[in-house]
């Protein structure tokens, strides 16, 4: 694994961002737990997404649908028959791979729509070796459905079988009628939903990039068919702005429009936002124009009418949908990778710093007394600030050490209460990125922080 990934993983464990799952029992492969700072950071990214795309907009609303749904949902959506990956085993060393991914890596291009037999023939034709033992000795691919199955109720038979949802999006489509009947939505309008999704991935890995349990933030934006292109392009721009606000460098992101043969049969346009991960470019999110496929399918399978009646013209139509789908845990990873820096200072020391956008930093302001004698007024100041900001108090160790500690968790501002503070009513504010220090009146502090957080 690359150094950056290793460094970030080590910082995550050391500084309470992400721990290996069930660690005291020897772990459970590819599961991760979000620690005190990590859970706050993840929530802050989610809140920022919700505020940007749901709360602040007049054309958007939220939804929180159940993880367990009637299994017919997944028949209608195509997940029961199509949501599978070609699983191949190396007969020499038992390494298990995804045939399509191995082929893509070898050909250095994306492949889509190939049958299992075509994948196998191509692998043999190109003599693609096993990445572990380098032999060309593959089993034929088997389609492996990625949905987790479980049972509802006390009897474990097929009648009680349900799936853990592999995406949050279907909860929006099945509630389309409820939403229309209970709100006064007018096209175009969208519904945003976040939450856990589960996929029994064949090759999870790269830390939290691909896990079997993850979180998504998805939007279904319903439009008149003739306006879909326009809103598709608008969503691409809106997400570019979103990533910019999260301090993701522009040169780490690129757009990859899907080729015609790569598109699902119902999609007329799909673009992936890709990020340059330490292991190469990888998908961060997708924006797809899905036409009326999902509403049509659910109409067919449920027998319910999932259509829109224009209140002025009385025209009845099935809206088209533009779907921006982003993984929250994947967004968390790129926020950390983009924020991480090891700097060598003028005095030769190194400092590790996370350059989080201030509004998502787990701790926004740290308060220190210069010495223990000032701990009482410093604690008072901390209590006041904590009412308005995510604040932390620290009085242990040398001041330089306390700065380093806050740099490592990406705290944008540190405030020090010193010998003179009582007399002059001023404190020193130190900014994380520039390390510049400024003295200011305590009563001006809140306005100063408000402007920057
Ligand atoms: P991939 O090609 O990486 O498997 P996908 O194209 O199947 O992803 P979508 O179904 O479009 O992914 O899901 C939308 C988003 O959900 C992805 O862009 C990604 O951010 C996130 N996501 C999907 N699968 C996982 C996973 N196993 N772990 C973490 N995040 C995921």
Image: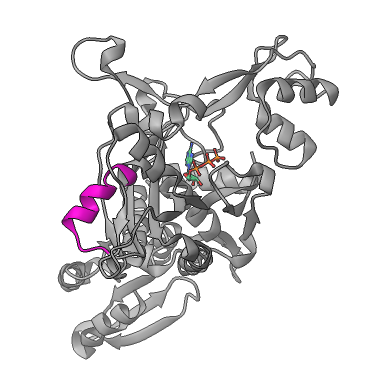
* Position of residue 273 in the picture relative to residue 438 (left or right): right
Q: Is residue 276 above or below residue 59?
A: above
Q: Is residue 176 magenta?
A: yes
Q: Quadrant of the C terminus?
A: bottom left
- The front one of 122 and 46 is 122
Q: Picture quarter containing residue 253?
A: bottom right
Residue 314 appears in the picture as rendered: yes
Q: Is residue 420 visible?
A: no
Counting from the top left corner in percent of width and height, residue 222 is at: 38, 58
What secondary structure is the stretch in magenta mostly built from? Answer: helix
Q: Is residue 205 above or below residue 54?
A: above
Q: Which residue is more in the foreground, 133 or 254? A: 254
Look at 38% across and 27% down and name the residue there.
Answer: 23
Image height of 238 relative to 151, above or below: below
Whether residue 409 sits left or right of residue 183 in the image: it is right
- Of 338 and 118, nearer the camera is 118
Left or right: 17 in relation to 239: left
Residue 195 screen position, x and y as percent: 32, 44
Figure quadrant of the N terminus:
top right
Q: Which residues are magenta?
A: 173-185
Q: Is residue 140 magenta?
A: no
**Who's the residue at 28% across and 77% down the image?**
418
Residue 103 on image: x %, y %: 73, 31
């Amino acid at each position: 694994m690359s150094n950056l990934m290793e460094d970030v993983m080590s910082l995550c464990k050391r500084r309470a961002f992400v721990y290996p799952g069930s660690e005291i029992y020897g772990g459970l492969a590819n599961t991760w737990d979000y620690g005190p700072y990590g859970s706050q950071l993840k929530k802050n990214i989610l809140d920022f997404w919700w505020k940007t795309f749901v709360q602040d907009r007049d054309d958007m609303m939220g939804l929180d649908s159940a993880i367990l749904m009637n299994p017919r949902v997944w028949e209608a959506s195509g997940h029961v028959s199509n949501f599978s990956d070609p699983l191949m085993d190396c007969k020499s060393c038992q390494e298990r791979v995804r045939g399509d991914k191995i082929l893509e890596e070898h050909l250095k291009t994306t492949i889509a729509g190939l049958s299992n037999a075509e994948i196998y023939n191509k692998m043999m034709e190109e003599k693609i070796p096993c990445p572990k033992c380098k032999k060309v000795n593959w089993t034929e691919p088997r389609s492996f459905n990625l949905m987790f199955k479980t049972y509802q109720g006390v009897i474990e038979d097929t009648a009680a079988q349900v799936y853990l949802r592999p995406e949050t999006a279907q909860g929006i489509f099945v509630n389309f009628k409820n939403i229309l009947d209970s709100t006064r939505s007018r096209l175009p309008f969208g519904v945003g939903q976040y939450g856990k999704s589960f996929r029994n991935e064949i090759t999870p890995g790269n830390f939290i990039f691909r896990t079997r349990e993850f979180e998504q933030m998805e939007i279904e934006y319903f439009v008149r068919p003739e306006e879909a292109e326009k809103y598709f392009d608008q969503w691409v721009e809106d997400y570019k702005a979103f990533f910019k606000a999260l301090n993701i460098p522009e040169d780490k992101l690129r757009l990859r429009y899907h080729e015609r043969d790569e598109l699902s049969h119902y999609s007329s346009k799909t673009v992936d936002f890709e990020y340059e991960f330490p292991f190469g470019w990888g998908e961060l999110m997708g924006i797809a124009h899905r036409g009326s496929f999902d509403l049509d399918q659910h109409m067919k399978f449920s027998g319910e009418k999932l259509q829109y009646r224009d209140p002025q013209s009385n025209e009845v139509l099935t809206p088209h949908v533009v779907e921006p789908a982003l993984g929250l845990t994947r967004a968390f990873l790129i926020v950390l990778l983009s924020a991480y820096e090891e700097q060598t200072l003028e005095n030769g020391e190194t400092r590790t710093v996370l350059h989080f956008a201030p509004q998502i930093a787990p701790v926004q302001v740290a308060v220190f007394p210069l010495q223990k004698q000032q701990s009482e007024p410093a604690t008072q100041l901390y209590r006041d600030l904590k009412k308005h900001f995510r604040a932390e108090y620290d009085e242990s160790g040398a001041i330089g050490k306390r700065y380093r500690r806050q740099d490592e968790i990406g705290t944008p501002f540190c405030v020090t209460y010193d010998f003179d503070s009582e007399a002059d009513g001023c404190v020193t504010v130190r900014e994380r990125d520039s390390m510049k220090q400024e003295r200011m009146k305590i009563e001006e502090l809140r306005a100063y922080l408000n402007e920057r957080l």
